[in-house]
Image (cartoon, rainbow, N blue to C red):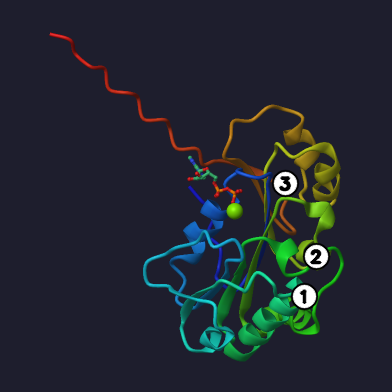
Amino acid sequence: MRPKISPYEKVTIIGENGSGKSTLALGYVKNMPSAIIHDPKHEVQLPNFHITENPRDLLRFARVIWRSPGDMDPVDAGNILGEAVLTRKWTCLSLNEAALVAPGQRMGPKLRQAIITGRSLKIGVWAETQRPVDVHNLFFSEAHAYFASPNLIKSDAQKVVGFVRGYDEFSSQTWPKFTWLFYRKGEGTAQILKLGRAERPKRRRDSR
Ligand SMILES: Nc1ncnc2c1ncn2[C@@H]1O[C@H](COP(=O)(O)OP(=O)(O)O)[C@@H](O)[C@H]1O
Ligand SMILES: [Mg+2]
């Protein structure tokens, strides 16, 4: 049902707050043999992942969740992550909120290098964003695949239209929550994924 994606691809997920970006990304990343998850909002917990604030742990554990210190500059945090994955190789970097490692068009050189040379070094990058207009263009131009919520507001949708073929057409309709448009660069047009879990019906209480 979900598209197959290698751990070493670059994937950008664009969706409004609460649209299910993190759930979608973690569904893939949790099964990867080597991954760093940047968790600046302290909301990620996964079995078999080591949770840490210490940047040195990024080279010590195959599967690690990094809670970067709240007072750290986002560009510095991105650079630390970039350097770690450039050293590790054969790994995946999951960015819970891309604006918290590359605000606006600011990005540290190591993160930039990790994104640009990622394919040859086998470095995957999964970037989530709720404000595509505020996030570095490399997350769009270098991505191999995109998941985009069809329910974005206009200004955000405008940026996505240029990268996800068919976005305009799909987003003019109304879609239930947890619907995604998946687009692989170079392919014909986006495909719809309905990932919403059906609401469990409330059990009727029998009154005897
Ligand atoms: N496919 C889904 N079906 C039902 N609920 C979901 C689905 N994906 C996410 N959710 C729920 O929606 C809420 C927001 O999801 P989350 O992944 O945190 O969104 P985001 O990262 O975009 O803010 C969470 O409570 C999550 O459990
Ligand atoms: Mg999230």
Outermost top residue: 208
N-term mark: 3 or 2: 2
Instruction: Find the distance from the CA under tag 1 to the CA under tag 2.
Output: 7 Å
| Residue at left offset 78%, top offset 38% | 153
Task: Estimate the x, y position of residue 147 in percent, counting from the top left.
Answer: 65, 51
Mark 2: few/some/many CA within 10 Å (<14, 14-19, 20+): some
For the residue pair 200 and 167, the one nearer the viewer reads as 200
The residue labelled by disc 1 is 75
Residue type at mark 3? Answer: Thr
Residue sitting at 46 percent across and 84 percent down?
61
Which is more N-terminal, label 1 or label 3? 1
Asked if the residue at tag 2 contacts the one at tag 3, i.e. Cβ–Cβ closer than 8 Å, the answer is no
**Residue 86, above or below 143:** below
Task: Estimate how packed mark 3 is, as few (under 14), some (14 to 19) or many (20 or more) residues with alpha carbons within 10 Å.
Answer: some
Q: Position of residue 35 (x, y in %)?
A: 52, 75
In the picture provided, is 84 more to the left or to the right than 112? left
Q: Is residue 45 in sight in this rendering?
A: yes
Q: Amino acid at mark 2?
A: Pro
Q: Which residue is mark 3?
A: 189
